[in-house]
């Protein structure tokens, strides 16, 4: 089995002393490939070191809406520089988070500035959306024509929102949230998502899937989300793993041409 974890933070402090073991445990569970997301100087530096060390790791970076106050030209230039690496393929996670206290208009500005950067670099985007479906959708709809594509990371909407983001051409990435008892609407969305547009992820170290919720999440646990989704869709886990793997590679490859020209 070959699984692609489309959103993980093994560059977070929690994994610093355990990185090789985490990657080995993931491989043992079939999770061979991952997209690692950097969100500050420290995690970006760790990400770039990982890209040089592990050929099956791809990179993404961006300013999370929680940090919108800190986004400036220095941060933007750091992203441009990272994008020169041949396996840096995605701008993200970027988006809107209305659960945090950061001013909404500031979040919109920083989100749109990074969408413009992704358009300029020809890279797809990884979108963070928390309690902000309508505004996230409205902004992405405006940028749809100019973007090469994107991922709704840890998609946690219902089937109707799924349909709207799918219509914008986005992939929907399902995390451990789809296994949670309190998320029947996310299961409905996962039922309604075409297999050709579905991705899987951990968002490690967060959102550990059932039945391991008391443990810290890590990329290998994408396996349990794959098995859960396969059961939900009444199909072999192997087939769901392969399909989501192919989708992730297609998404990752869509950001290749431009970065190689830099
Ligand atoms: Zn994340």
Image: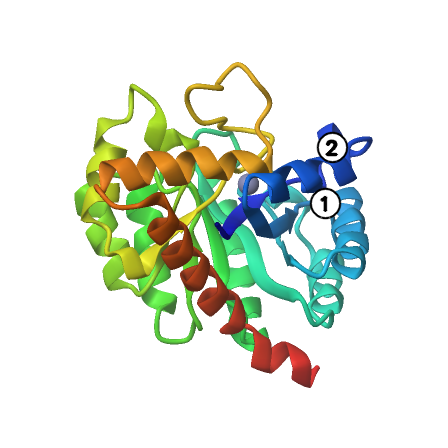
Residue drawn at 58 percent across, 76 percent down? 256
In the rendering, which numbered label is found on residue 63?
none
Measure the C-alpha gap from mark 1 to mark 2.
16 Å
Which quarter of the rendered picture does the C terminus lie within?
A: bottom right
Q: Which residue is mark 1?
A: 40
Q: What is the residue that sits farthest to the top in this orientation?
A: 214
The label number, if any, that marks residue 15 in the structure image = 2
User: Residue 70's image quarter?
Assistant: top right
* x, y percent for residue 189: 23, 42
Q: Position of residue 211 (x, y in %)?
A: 43, 19
At 80% from the left edge and 50% from the top edge, which residue is drawn?
45
Q: Position of residue 188 (x, y in %)?
A: 19, 37
Residue 255: x and y in percent read 54, 72
The reply, left or right, for residue 46 in relation to residue 38 is: right
Question: Looking at the image, how many numbered discs can be counted on the residues?
Answer: 2
Viewer can see residue 131: no
Identified at 52% across, 66% down, the residue is: 252
Mark 2 is surrounded, within 10 Å at the Cα level, by few (under 14), some (14 to 19) or many (20 or more) other residues, namely some
In the image, 99 versus 86, the foreground residue is 86
């Amino acid at each position: 089995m070959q699984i692609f974890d489309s959103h993980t933070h093994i560059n977070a402090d929690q994994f610093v002393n355990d990185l090789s073991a985490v990657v080995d445990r993931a491989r043992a569970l079939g999770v061979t490939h991952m997209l690692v997301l950097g969100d500050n100087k420290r995690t970006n530096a760790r990400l770039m070191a990982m890209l040089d060390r592990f050929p099956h790791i791809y990179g993404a970076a961006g300013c999370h809406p929680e940090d919108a106050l800190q986004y400036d030209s220095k941060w933007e230039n750091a992203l441009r520089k990272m994008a020169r690496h041949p396996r840096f393929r995605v701008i993200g996670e970027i988006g809107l988070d209305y659960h945090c206290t950061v001013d909404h208009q500031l979040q919109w500005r920083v989100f749109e500035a990074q969408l413009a950067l992704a358009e300029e670099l020809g890279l797809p985007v990884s979108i963070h959306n928390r309690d902000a479906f309508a505004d996230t959708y409205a902004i992405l709809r405006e940028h749809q024509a100019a973007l090469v594509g994107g991922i709704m990371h840890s998609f946690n909407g219902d089937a109707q929102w799924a349909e709207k983001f799918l219509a914008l051409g986005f992939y929907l990435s399902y995390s451990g949230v789809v296994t949670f008892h309190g998320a029947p609407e996310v299961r409905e969305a996962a039922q309604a998502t075409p297999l050709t547009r579905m991705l899987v992820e951990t968002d490690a170290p967060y959102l550990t899937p059932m039945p391991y919720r008391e443990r810290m999440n890590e990329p290998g646990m994408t396996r349990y989300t794959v098995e859960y989704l396969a059961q939900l869709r009444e199909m072999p886990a192997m087939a769901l793993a392969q399909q989501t793997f192919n989708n992730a590679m297609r998404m990752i490859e869509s950001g290749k041409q431009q970065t190689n020209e830099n």
